[in-house]
Amino acid sequence: MIFFLDDLQNLGSPNSDAIALSLRDQFQSFAVDGINCSVCFSAPLNYFSDIRTFAEPAVRFYDKVHLEPFTPTETLEYVAAVFGPRAANISGFSEWLQAKTHGHPYFMAFICRQMAALAHGSLEQNNTIHHWPTIFARLETEKFRADLAQVPESELQLLRVLAHKQDNRIVVKELPAGYRVYFSRLTERGLLTRTGRGRYKLYHPLFREFLKQQP
């Protein structure tokens, strides 16, 4: 038996080290009792960065697997698994999906789930074009507005500025010193990605598209 826990960082506990340790203790006790159980959870890449000194045994207990963006071949395999390998226009839809999501697993799953519901699994190009505004509106409601729910207006303004930059990238030194503290906060929230020393970009082009449409 495998237990899957998504977004472990959102569990209601004041300390991430307490969560990591309790999970380790629970699943080690399963093994002692001869119960064949495993746990697989998702969390930000830096989930253990602040707890290493407090929960080193817990850190060693887990095997890390970094989920990278899907390649075009992997995207095609994913679409075939969802809609069936004989679905009409599967190659064309896979190419469109890869271009829209850049292989981001969450956005791929979201769009495919919506297409299955709205277009009854039809991947024809006219269906994709017709349903995309509805899908993006749902993505805005279910994902992007949740991303920004706890973001202060000052940090939101920085995101808007970045969204309207031509290259979607910004260097810390381009802004006044008072803005620089926002970069680490927004990176911790997963809204910015660090691309180099003092260089950042929005975490995904679809998020940028959403920000650009905001007043």
Image (tube, helix red, strand yellow):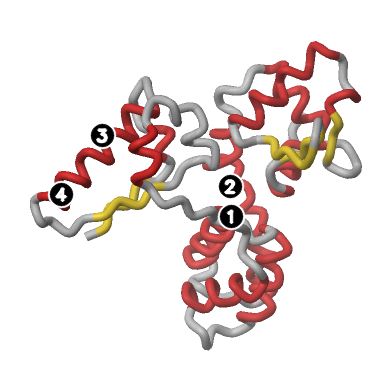
Kindly report the distance in space between the C-alpha atoms of the residues bearing marks 2 and 3.
34 Å
Above or below residue 7? Residue 181 is above
In the rendered image, which residue does mark 4 sit on?
Answer: 30
Counting residues from the start of the chain, the first of labels 1 and 2 encountered is 1
Of callouts 2 and 3, which one flags the residue occurring earlier in the amino acid sequence? Answer: 3
- Amino acid under disc 1: Phe
Q: What's the distance in space between the residues labelled 4 and 2, CA to CA?
A: 39 Å
Q: How much space separates mark 3 and mark 4, taking CA atoms?
A: 12 Å
**Comes first in the chain, label 1 or label 3:** 3
Dot 3 alpha-carbon crowd within 10 angstroms: few under 14, some 14 to 19, many 20 or more:
few
Q: Residue furthest left?
A: 33
Instruction: Say which amino acid is labelled 2.
Output: Leu
Residue at 72% from the left image edge and 25% from the top image edge = 183
| Residue nearer the viewer, 8 or 56 | 56
Q: Amino acid at mark 3?
A: Ser
Q: Which residue is mark 3?
A: 22
What's the mark number on residue 139?
2
- What residue is drawn where x is 55% and y is 76%? 77
Residue drawn at point x = 54 percent, y = 83 percent:
87
Q: Quadrant of the N terminus?
A: bottom left
Report the number of numbered marks: 4
Nearer the observer, 143 or 36? 36
Q: Counting residues from the N terminus, which is met first, the one under dot 3 or under dot 4? A: 3
Mark closest to the chain's N terminus, 1 or 4 = 4
- Dot placed on the residue nearer the N-terminal end, 4 or 2: 4
Q: Which mark is residue 107?
A: 1
Verify CB contact (< 8 Å) between mark 1 and mark 2.
Answer: yes
Label 2 element class: helix
Q: Nearer the viewer, mark 1 or mark 3?
A: 3
State the CA–CA distance, disc 1 to disc 2: 9 Å
Q: How far is the residue under mark 1 from the one under mark 4? A: 35 Å
